[in-house]
Amino acid sequence: MASTRTPARTPQQTSQRRGEGQWALGYREPLNPNERSKKDDNPLNVRSRIENIYAHTGFDGIDPGDLRGRFRWFGLYTQRKPGIDGGRTATLEPEELDDEYFMMRVRIDGGAVTTAQLAAIGEVSEIYARDTADITDRQNIQYHWIRIEDVPAIWEKLEGVGLTTMEACGDSPRVILGSPLAGIAEDEVLDASSAVEEIKSRFIGEKEFANLPRKFKTAISGLPDVAHEIHDVAFVGVNHPEHGPGLDLWVGGGLSTNPMIGVRLGAWVPLDEVPEVWAGVISIFRDYGYRRLRHRARLKFLVKDWGPEKFREVLETEYLHRKLVDGPAPAVPDQPHDHIGVHRQKDGRYYVGAAPIAGRVSGSTLVGVAKAAERVGSSRVRFTPLQKIVVLDVPEGEVPVLQQELANLGLRSEPSVWRRGVMACTGIEFCKLAIVETKARAVDLVDQLETRLADITAGITTPISVHINGCPNSCARIQTADIGLKGQIVTDADGKQVEGFQVHLGGGLGLDAGFGRKLRGHKVTGAELPGYVERVVRNFVAQRLDGERFAQ
Ligand code: SF4
């Protein structure tokens, strides 16, 4: 078990980095309002106030410190007031943007649900969320239009089937990404589900990790299918030549401003030691992470300053009290895993992966998927980091039946390359930070590309990803897309200020790990977008070499 004490430091060491607010260097006084809020009251305490006070007083009775701070530890953000255009986002005070309804995020570690859980998620949406449900690129489900009065009843229904919204947001250990194919993939190094489950049951909702400098993102997978390069900590399956299957440890990845690819520590971790090593890494973040400036608080900044050798040394000496085993790098896939289509499992049954557009589904759709899966004898469904949905354990003879039922629900298991490759964040419909519309634009873009590029689509054999963000944050991972689109206000041909995008080209993960090139001054309006993407793709197809991927 990793030590969770805060190591003592000499006065000299303390004064060196005091300015960053690192607890381990003796600095415990908050240096900004967020740190103050967390120190004044552990954010996990807000649950009882929601149940006992705010659910009865309604929206107007909520303490602002809870509303815009501690609520996040239970997956709750106020959503954007309808009708405020993106040009005003930066000019208004937070309370002017707040609607009295909430976005609620349900954490689904490893993206794994039973059909009973999926039906419960859908029913909550139908009853309390106006039938909204988005699959996020972190395998969560997001609702909208939630009233504070209904939150206790929602928790009761979700928790009744073993689901939670705890630490779905906030400066906490967020949902753990895991392979949608854990335990069934023929090519996985190992099934990492037990590590995901153990971390969740031992550490999520515990006070020791409820006050971190910023959010902390984890990915654990026996396959390289969880974007491990851009997580605060990641464990990726690898075969050690002497010790056999285990996981390779990465730290310090992250997007948003100052995007950074994570670094390998060169350590091989056996599956049963993953929770202990995870606890060591998150303890370093809690103790040594920078707490002065929010935009420099993610673990990646500490890793950049320390480098992988020092990080590993501190982990081993101060937290694990033992050496880690050196290990090789994981294999790199030549194509990203998106789990779409019909594929054989290692037990001889099949999984069927299907694509909504940019993760947008509904509560009734999810109830429909649960029923369809059960009709063909499956009780397990997975969400993917690419906003897709996968039904596991389908007998071979039932595959066409399920495919048809999913298609009737708007979920295609043989989608076009465009439906398959487009992702989008929440955008201006509900997000208070957004500058532009994203989800509806994604639907329109897929529609248009399917028509405009019908003559060449069949010849495109490698995926082309198009990721759409509503603002400079990177919830839809634009820097890692073939075509990344960052929402902003641009000037159109008539000199009008309209919604548009800054373009990044050529990003990728896996074999092509690296961030897309921001094309300075290269901006498109929303109206020009389908035509722009069409031109880029036609140029690529005309000039590519045999087998060349977009990011090469
Ligand atoms: Fe909101 Fe921006 Fe994130 Fe999109 S990228 S969900 S607009 S914060």
Image (cartoon, rainbow, N blue to C red):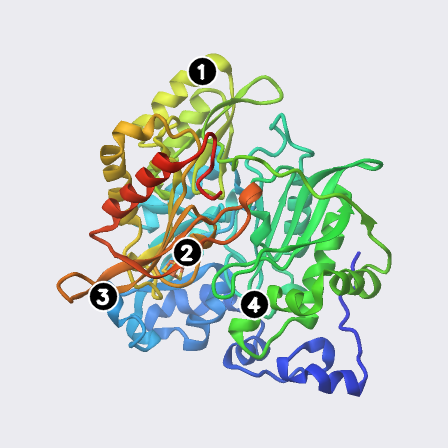
Q: Quadrant of residue 208?
A: bottom right
Disc 4 is placed on an element classified as loop
Mark nearest the camera among 3 and 2 is 3
Q: Is residue 358 left or right of residue 15?
A: left
Give the x, y percent position of residue 240: 78, 38
Q: Where residue 214 is drawn, which disc sits there?
A: 4
- Distance from disc 1 to disc 4, alpha carbons, whole Å, reads 46 Å
Measured as percent of width and height from the top left, residue 210 is found at 61, 65
Where residue 104 is drawn, which disc sits there? 2
Crowd around label 2: few <14 · some 14–19 · many ≥20 (10 Å): many
Residue at 46 percent across and 66 percent down: it is 71
* Distance (Cα) linking label 4 and label 3: 29 Å
Earlier in the chain: of badge 2 and badge 4, it is: 2
The label nearer to you, 1 versus 3, is: 3
- The residue under the point 50% across, 14% down is 396
Question: What's the mark number on residue 25?
Answer: none
Q: Nearer the viewer, residue 343 or 58?
A: 343
Task: Look at mark 1 in the image and give the residue it sits on.
Answer: 398
Pointer 3: what residue? 85
Residue closest to the eye, 189 or 94: 189
The residue lying at 49 percent from left, 32 percent from top is: 339
The local crowd at label 4, few if under 14, some if 14 to 19, many if 20 or more residues have their Cα within 10 Å, is many
Name the residue nearer the viewer: 443 or 128.
Answer: 443
Q: Amino acid at mark 4?
A: Arg
Q: Quadrant for residue 492, please give it.
A: bottom left
Which amino acid lies under the numbered mark 2 shown in the image of this protein?
Answer: Met
